[in-house]
Image (cartoon, rainbow, N blue to C red):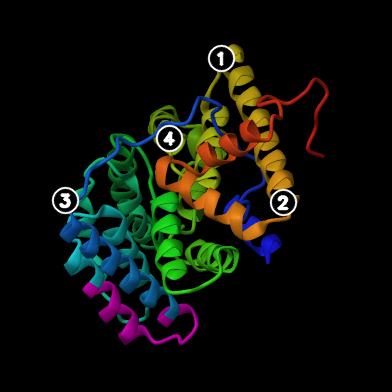
Amino acid sequence: MLNGYLNRFILGLAIAAGAAGCAGPQEKAAQVQSPARENQMTEADGLAAEALAAYHLQRDGARTLNLIAAATNRAPQRADLAYLQLALCRAIEGCQPEPYETIVRKLEPANAVVWMRVLEQAQQQRETSVEAHILEAMGRAETFNVHWNELVAAITGARIALGAGANAALSETVGWLGETIVPSLQPLTHACARTRTAEREWAQRCSKLAQVLANADTYVVEALGLKIAQQVTAEKLEQDRLAQRALTARYLWRESGTIIESQVERDKFALQLVELMRKLRREQDVQLAVVRWAGSPVVPPRGWTDE
């Protein structure tokens, strides 16, 4: 039901503190597709949906990998499906993720998410110099994208086209993707722990990383980025700005959740959410759009608290 959907939709799973910017939604440029291209993309989405179902419902790793490979073969330039293939490989015992990491790096050289496995590996092997180089590489990226909106919209749409109810399809898809495409953030929190950022050079690495994370396409990753940014910032004015941004984000998170939960025509509203996801890059942009649609303030009222 919608409660389960909301728990995944807002991605308030990993950390309670965080923030999202309140800049206006950034819509992607509309692309005109040929009928053949549209059919190809529809087939790819359907195969990706089957792959997720094979993994989450059947726990059939071999079938999952075959289906997602078929999906990426039909749409080899789609970075979202390439990342989903990597994420599924990461979750399936015996699958070697290196070839898929190479594909994601080629399609999205400015996406830091592809470094997460090797960062964790360097930490496990206590290779501090390697960890430092990985943090620097991540800090040179532009963002940390798991393609949340794109994948939720594409896969939910494919399932609806096959006859699933909109709200049920959205809820289940969000649950599946929430368990699959958002990597554990523990390597990042460990890398930028206070005991490590006390060292100036390490703090500089984490400061650059925080900027990248703050541009992520999911609330939970952006939240961690802003948390790290507050930790490594010495300037009082900047700390205050980040604290206000965090407060605004938590307000939008809770307010959008309340609005979604209050809807009566859930299938209709689920379709509207899917359309928002098709147009907007970030999960946080959808939250902001929902709050604006409801006519609620987009900044927390004076005295508002989430406690």
Which residue is under mark 2? Answer: 263
Amino acid type at circle 1 is Glu
Residue linked to disc 1: 235
Of marks 2 and 1, the one in the foreground: 2
| 59 inside magenta stretch | yes
Mark 3 and mark 4 in contact? Answer it, CB < 8 Å: no
Does residue 272 appear to the left or right of 144 in the view shown? right
| Residue placed under numbered mark 3 in the picture | 106
Q: Please state, as top left, top right, bottom left or bottom right, where the N terminus lies in the image.
A: bottom right
- Which segment is the magenta one? 54-70
Structural distance between the alpha carbons of marks 2 and 1 = 43 Å
Task: Indicate the secondary structure of the residue bearing disc 4.
Answer: loop
Provide the residue designation for mark 4. Answer: 215
The image quadrant of residue 236 is top right
How far apart, in angstroms, are the residues tagged by discs 3 and 1?
38 Å
Q: If you read the primary sequence from the N terminus, does the residue marked by circle 3 or circle 1 appear first?
A: 3
Residue 188, x across and y down, in percent: 46, 48
Element under disc 3:
helix
Cα separation between marks 3 and 4: 20 Å
